[in-house]
Image: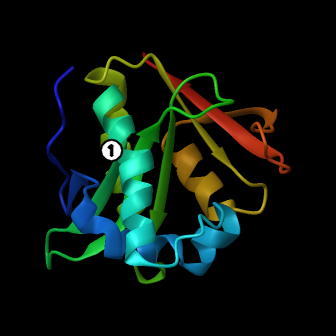
């Protein structure tokens, strides 16, 4: 499988997360909705974010040739969010996830970026199915996951987690 260097959509570029993205990851991961719906990753400094990238994102990308991508607006070069395909303990196969800075929510960027990544995952990454998980309270994510074509199957609980999550799935056609 080839390494993905850049993905392009009509309005966006998606690049694999790199160490240079640490200040952005710090900002994104401390956004109120990120902490509320995804969780507090205890990133308090740029160095914390760099270590998170080194320990989580870079090894995943090296192992699978996919992972977390920074989403950049073509129009002005601003980093606006991230989307990714991840292998996660407790799930039967890779899952798709996304997050945005508050000012970029509700503008269709989540669907545009995640749809492109999902299509590539099923056609180019050699994956047979993709899942997604979200909390019961995260209605916006549920709507996006369903708009992407994933179907709700059941409630699950990940290892070492106390919260039940909605589990969705889509298979290669």
The location of residue 93, given as percent across then percent down, is: 55, 23
The location of residue 69, given as percent across then percent down, is: 31, 52
Residue 3 versus residue 149: which sits nearer the camera?
3
Name the image colouring: rainbow
**Which residue of the protein is positioned furthest toward the bottom in this rendering?**
103
The correct choice, above or below, for 57 with respect to 94 in the image is below
The correct choice, above or below, for 98 with respect to 124 in the image is below
The location of residue 14, given as percent across then percent down, is: 23, 54
For label 1, count other residues whose C-alpha is less than 10 Å away and answer few (under 14), some (14-19) or many (20+). Answer: some
Q: Quadrant of the C terminus?
A: top left
Residue at point 60% right, 69% down?
Answer: 42
Q: Element at badge 1? A: helix
Residue 16 versus residue 151: which sits nearer the camera?
16
Residue at point 83% right, 46% down?
Answer: 164
- Count the numbered circles shown: 1
The correct choice, above or below, for 151 with respect to 133 in the image is above
Residue 163 visible somewhere in the drawing: yes
Residue at point 60% right, 57% down?
Answer: 141
Residue 108 visible somewhere in the drawing: no
Q: Quadrant of residue 48?
A: bottom left
149 with respect to 89 (left or right) = left
Q: Identify the residue under disc 1.
A: 58
Residue at point 29% right, 33% down?
Answer: 62
96 with respect to 40 (left or right) = left
Q: Quadrant of the N terminus?
A: top left
The location of residue 52, given as percent across then percent down, is: 44, 57
The correct choice, above or below, for 27 with respect to 108 in the image is below
């Amino acid at each position: 499988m080839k390494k993905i260097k850049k993905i392009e959509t009509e309005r966006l570029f998606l690049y694999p997360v790199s160490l240079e993205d640490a200040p952005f990851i710090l900002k994104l991961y401390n956004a109120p909705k990120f902490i509320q719906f995804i969780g507090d990753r205890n990133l308090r400094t740029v160095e914390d974010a760099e270590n998170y990238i080194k320990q989580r994102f870079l090894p995943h990308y090296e192992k699978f040739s996919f992972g977390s991508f920074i989403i950049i607006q073509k129009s002005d070069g601003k980093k606006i969010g991230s989307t990714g395909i991840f292998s996660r303990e407790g799930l039967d196969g890779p899952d798709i996830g996304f997050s945005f800075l508050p000012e970029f929510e509700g503008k269709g960027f989540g669907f545009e970026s995640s749809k492109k990544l999902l299509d590539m995952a099923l056609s180019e990454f050699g994956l047979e199915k993709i899942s997604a998980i979200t909390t019961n309270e995260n209605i916006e994510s549920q709507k996006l996951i369903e708009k992407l074509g994933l179907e709700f199957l059941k409630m699950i609980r990940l290892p070492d987690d106390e919260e039940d999550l909605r589990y969705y799935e889509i298979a290669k056609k």
